Amino acid sequence: MSKALRYLAGVRPEAATHLLGFYKQSVKALDPKSYHLIQIVTKVVVGTERGLRQYAPKALKAGASREEIMDAVLMAFPAAGLNKVLDAIDILNDLELLPPLPGDAVAPLHSSPELGPIEEFPLGKMHCVNRPEGDLIVFRTGERTVRVYLARCPHSKATLCKGVDHGDRVECRVHNWVFDLASGRCLGPDAEGKPGMVLVPAEVREGRVVLTA
Ligand code: FES
């Protein structure tokens, strides 16, 4: 439930009860994935960024693929028009919930193995490095030690560079998995059996952080 609906339920409980009852009854035959995909269509038609940011991650969580989310956006076209569809594409690309461009998946570029001087990475803080072949997260653990990870969440590939920075942990914004930056381990929720962040071999050489593989 959105903050605004929670507020409405507090100040106008009767109105909110009826409204929520209507919502519940009107979708009772739909499975969660279809429900959330249809929500995407309606949010694109209405042009609400807040609604898209709320429902598109839920569609993914309910089992929709990025291609299906793209289909939902395009289905809104006859009612929404081109501008709202393009706005929605910008928002969903920002959340990394749309299919990648074909070239993105197959053209790794070989940029320099150097990530920068060690002083650029403050101790115990998460630091994102944007690279053509994919973003990295650097976490400095000591005067001359670092851990470097792929920035892609091991769950469903959202970027952890846009995750919530909790200092020594990062939380993915899509399904809220939390990772320990010193070890890369998944801390939860329900961490058992969940994959950790993907470690990239790196070391500090003559005061610079360098990828070694
Ligand atoms: S994509 Fe699901 S937790 Fe990150």
Image (cartoon, rainbow, N blue to C red):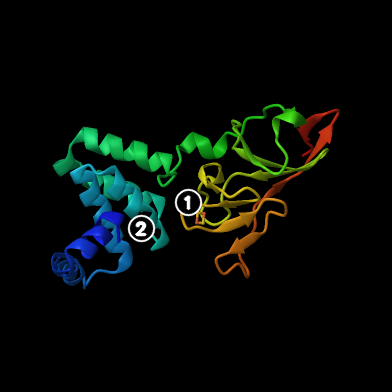
How many C-alpha atoms fall within 10 Å of the one at disc 1: few (<14), some, or many (≥20)?
some
- Viewer-closest of 198 and 78: 198
Tell me: residue 7, above or below residue 69: below
Residue 89, position as x, y percentages in the image: 33, 39
Q: CA–CA distance between discs 1 and 2?
A: 14 Å
- Tell me residue 21's x, y (percent): 17, 71
Looking at the picture, how far across and down is residue 125, in whole percent?
A: 66, 42
**Which residue shows up at 47% across the image and 58% down it?**
175
> Badge 1 is on which residue?
173
Mark 2 highlights which residue? 59
Whether residue 150 can be seen here: yes
**Number of numbered discs present?**
2
Residue 176, percent from left and from top: 50, 57
Whether label 1 lies within 8 Å of ligand 1 gets the answer yes
Q: Disc 1 on helix, strand or loop? A: loop
Using the image, tell me which numbered label, if any, was put on residue 20: none
Determine whether the beta carbon of the residue marked 2 sits less than 8 angstroms from the nearest atom of ligand 1. Answer: no
Residue 95 appears left or right of 38: right
Q: For the residue labelled by badge 2, is the local secondary structure a helix, a strand or a loop?
A: helix
Looking at the rendering, which quadrant does residue 213 occupy? top right
Q: Does any portion of residue 113 appear in the rendered image? A: no
Q: Is residue 200 left or right of residue 102?
A: right
Specify the amino acid type for callout 1: Arg
Whichever of callouts 1 and 2 sits on the residue coming sooner in the sequence is 2
Up/down of 176 relative to 13, above or below: above
Q: Looking at the picture, tell me which residue is in the foreground, 17 or 133.
A: 17
Residue density around tag 2, few if under 14, some if 14–19, many if 20 or more, within 10 Å: many
Q: Identify which residue, 165 or 186, lies in the foreground.
A: 165
User: Which residue is found at the position 59% from the left and 30% from the top?
Assistant: 132
Q: Amino acid at mark 2?
A: Ala
Look at 66% across and 50% down and name the residue there. Answer: 168
